[in-house]
């Protein structure tokens, strides 16, 4: 038999991705649906010699046309017609989850129901008769636990069986005489006037009655649908007369009536709702007063763990690149090609890859928080705070949390916001969230100046990003984005113990994007920066006379009031506009960091303050280097020594603040352009974020001087 094509469908947070990762492991790839900026996850695995291809559909509550995710899922079921759809259901919230099940049954989908989270259902006192539910729906119903192998064998057996003998479900639906009769009438006209439809005519009839714009347009364009549409309008008026409401509401009520009947026949509920473990934990972590302090504590712990575990690993990678650079230089001798490889490629890309352990560990910790169910609570906790201070609901905080990884998916996540003003406003503040691309810059500077307080300093920057975003949002909400926000309704999934495999897969999915960027964008930009630092022909490499040096020298006075007026720091900021990691690779290229750095200070070596003071007393600076240093240009100064030569602790912190807040990278601006279909908003974002970054960095540096932190 050919490979079986299955799709995983269900509400958000029901365990689809956990099941997908368990089945496919690393045999999966992530992209976008054709023509859509919605993530598409596909993978393959084998069961008893049978190859199975699986697609993880976006999490949805229904299959209407209200969101891109719903349209993607619906179109896949209609157009691709997978052999089997595995509908993963949260058994603890079975009534709500069955609404999507019913809509897939309307499509005639070949369903297998996977009841997940049964432990939580039992905690709530629910007893689900899966045999009875299976008989009522006409599809297999299997109890599973996505986090382990419970029910996995039985589920896979039923998937294979259902692929060979499909489950017929259309005749199982019952919506009452009034709704059913009207569906039947339209169905008959459709079969006569518009034959050859790519979906069941009963489903088309339902969608027409619900005034679905996509289906209505298809019937209009068919050329023979006028009689159909005329009768639809007539029946919609009839619904309004009979029910005192539109057809859409009447059909929704009919679906829930059918679900209520299913549940009453197959589910026993406790007379008094039990208090679950999730409820007890939520009383603490979502507490009115304790919620935000707990969130801040968890953020602080995240960065402490990241640096405690990641720093030593980064040191090994730095040593490896130092050895590689010195080996290449020793074997190739001096020359143009050697400079290209050692300074351009190893110094640029290698300087960024040193921070891979930090980024992967950060993503691992965030994956654990997400899989455990806590991040949803963080958005819930922020709802009251954001609504009161800003006028935005907590739903806007979800894209902001995603922005900690990368601003691009954070901006794409604003589609879940129904209010257009809220969506635009959230898009404009997401770039203030400190993405993973900025982490190498922070790590480089804190190692030079704040090695004893790394976690605290990084935490302060992430917190500053949130505070600035909220302040800017409050200002914009009172000026250019006036109006009420859409109500905030968000599901709080049950707490789960994350699986090691699931957390590692999520970490890899996000971290590999950083590696790909290092091998493509950062490599290309490193070559460009190296070339600009080598031209015009005949100038000393990476000197003030090079094109790079001239660019930096011209613009350096702009940044002098912020404490970093040297041309090297300025040019790193300018090139960092392309991608924030390039700030680090620029320093690596300019200073030839990539050759042997043995004997240089590391992040763990103490007394950064002593090094700074001694250098200061000797008058060491970029413009006025001692003659002895000029006599040995081939010596690699090391990242930390370079930072301590360029900055003081105060100006270094101001520099990190500027990197945190200034113009989003090109990919982020391009995403804003795509999501708004206008250059107006990315242009506005570029201008205003630069202004905010300048003002905040100025306040930090000049305020620090006034307070005596020079």
Image: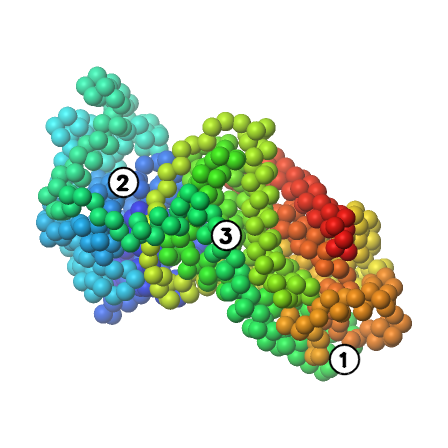
| Disc assigned to residue 366 | none
> Which tag, 2 or 1, sits closer to the chain's start?
2
Q: Residue at x 66, y 47 (%)?
A: 662
The colour scheme of the drawn protein is rainbow
Residue 683 shows up from this direction: no
> Which tag, 2 or 3, sits closer to the chain's start?
2
Front of the two marks 2 and 3: 3
Residue furthest out toward the bottom:
331
Q: Which of the two residues, 580 or 72, is positioned nearer the viewer here?
A: 580
Q: Is residue 14 above or below residue 639?
A: above
Residue 319 position, x and y percent, is 63, 77
The CA distance from mark 3 to mark 1 is: 52 Å
Query: Disc 1 on helix, strand or loop?
Result: loop
Residue bearing mark 2: 198
The CA distance from mark 2 to mark 1 is: 68 Å
Q: How many marks?
A: 3
Sort mark 1 into few (<14), some (14-19) or many (20+) by Cα contacts within 10 Å: few
Sort mark 2 into few (<14), some (14-19) or many (20+) by Cα contacts within 10 Å: few
Residue 43 position, x and y percent, is 36, 61
Q: Is residue 51 left or right of residue 177?
A: right
| Disc assigned to residue 296 | 3
Query: Disc 3 on helix, strand or loop?
Result: helix
Q: Residue at x 58, y 48 (%)?
A: 465
The quadrant of the image that shows the N terminus is bottom left
Residue 610 shows up from this direction: yes
Query: Disc 2 on helix, strand or loop?
Result: loop
Residue bearing mark 1: 333
């Amino acid at each position: 038999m050919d490979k079986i094509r299955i799709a995983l469908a269900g509400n958000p947070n029901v365990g689809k991705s956990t099941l997908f990762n368990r089945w496919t492991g690393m045999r999966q790839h992530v992209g976008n649906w054709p023509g859509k900026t919605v993530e598409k996850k596909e993978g393959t695995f084998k069961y008893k010699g049978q190859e199975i291809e699986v697609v993880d559909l976006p999490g949805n509550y229904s299959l209407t046309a209200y969101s891109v995710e719903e349209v993607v899922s619906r179109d896949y079921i209609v157009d691709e017609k997978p052999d089997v759809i595995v509908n993963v259901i949260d058994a603890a919230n079975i009534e709500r989850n069955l609404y999507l099940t019913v809509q897939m049954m309307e499509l005639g989908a070949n369903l297998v129901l996977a009841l997940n989270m049964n432990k939580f259902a039992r905690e709530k006192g629910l007893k689900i008769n899966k045999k009875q539910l299976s008989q009522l729906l006409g599809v297999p119903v299997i109890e599973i636990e996505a986090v382990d192998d419970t029910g996995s064998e039985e589920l896979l057996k039923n998937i294979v069986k259902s692929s060979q003998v499909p489950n017929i479900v259309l005749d199982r639906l019952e919506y009452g005489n009034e709704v059913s009769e009207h569906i039947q009438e339209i169905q008959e006209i459709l079969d006569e006037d518009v034959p050859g439809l790519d979906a069941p005519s009963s489903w088309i009839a339902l969608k027409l009655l619900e005034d679905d714009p996509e289906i209505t347009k298809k019937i209009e364009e068919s050329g023979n649908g006028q009689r159909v549409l005329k009768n639809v309008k007539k029946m919609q008026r009839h619904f309004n007369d009979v029910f005192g409401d539109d057809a859409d509401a009447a059909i929704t009520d009919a679906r829930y009536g059918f679900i209520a009947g299913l549940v009453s026949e197959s589910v026993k509920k406790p007379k008094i709702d039990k208090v679950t473990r999730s409820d007890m934990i939520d009383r603490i972590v979502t507490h009115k007063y304790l919620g935000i302090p707990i969130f801040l504590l968890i953020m602080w712990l995240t960065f402490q763990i990241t640096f405690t575990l990641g720093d030593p690993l980064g040191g090994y990678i730095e040593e490896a690149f130092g050895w590689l650079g010195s080996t290449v230089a020793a074997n190739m001798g001096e020359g143009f090609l050697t400079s290209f490889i050692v300074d351009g490629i190893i110094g640029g890309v290698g300087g960024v890859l040193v921070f891979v352990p930090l980024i992967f560990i950060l993503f691992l910790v965030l994956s654990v928080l997400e899989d455990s169910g806590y991040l949803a609570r963080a958005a819930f906790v922020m709802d009251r705070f954001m609504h009161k201070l800003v006028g935005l609901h907590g739903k806007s905080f979800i894209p902001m949390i995603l922005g900690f990884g990368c601003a691009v998916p954070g901006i794409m996540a604003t589609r879940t916001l129904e209010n257009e003003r809220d969506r635009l406003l959230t898009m404009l503040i997401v770039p203030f969230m400190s993405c993973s691309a900025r982490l190498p810059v922070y790590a480089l500077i804190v190692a030079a100046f704040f090695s004893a307080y790394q976690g605290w300093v990084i935490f302060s920057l992430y917190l500053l990003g949130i505070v600035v975003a909220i302040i800017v949002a409050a200002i914009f909400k009172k000026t250019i984005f006036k109006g009420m926000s859409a109500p905030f309704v968000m599901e709080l999934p049950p707490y789960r113990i994350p699986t090691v495999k699931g957390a590692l897969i999520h970490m890899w999915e996000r971290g590999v994007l950083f590696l790909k960027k290092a091998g493509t964008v950062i490599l290309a930009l490193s070559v460009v920066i190296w070339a600009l630092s080598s031209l015009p022909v005949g100038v000393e490499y990476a000197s003030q006379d090079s094109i790079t040096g001239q660019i930096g020298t011209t613009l350096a006075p702009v940044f002098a009031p912020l404490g970093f007026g040297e041309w090297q720091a300025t040019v790193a900021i300018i090139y960092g506009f392309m991608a924030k990691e390039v700030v680090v690779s620029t320093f690596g290229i300019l200073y030839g960091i990539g050759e042997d750095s043995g004997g240089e200070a590391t992040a763990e070596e103490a007394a950064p303050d002593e090094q700074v003071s001694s250098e200061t007393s000797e008058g060491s600076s970029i413009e006025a280097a001692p003659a002895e240093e000029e006599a040995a240009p081939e010596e690699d100064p090391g990242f930390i020594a370079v930072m301590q030569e360029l900055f003081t602790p105060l100006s270094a912190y101001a520099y990190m603040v500027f990197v945190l807040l200034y113009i989003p990278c090109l990919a982020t601006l391009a995403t804003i352009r795509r999501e708004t279909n206008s250059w107006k908003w990315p242009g506005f974002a570029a201008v205003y974020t630069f202004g905010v970054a300048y003002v905040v960095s100025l306040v930090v540096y000049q305020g620090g001087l006034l307070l005596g932190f020079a």
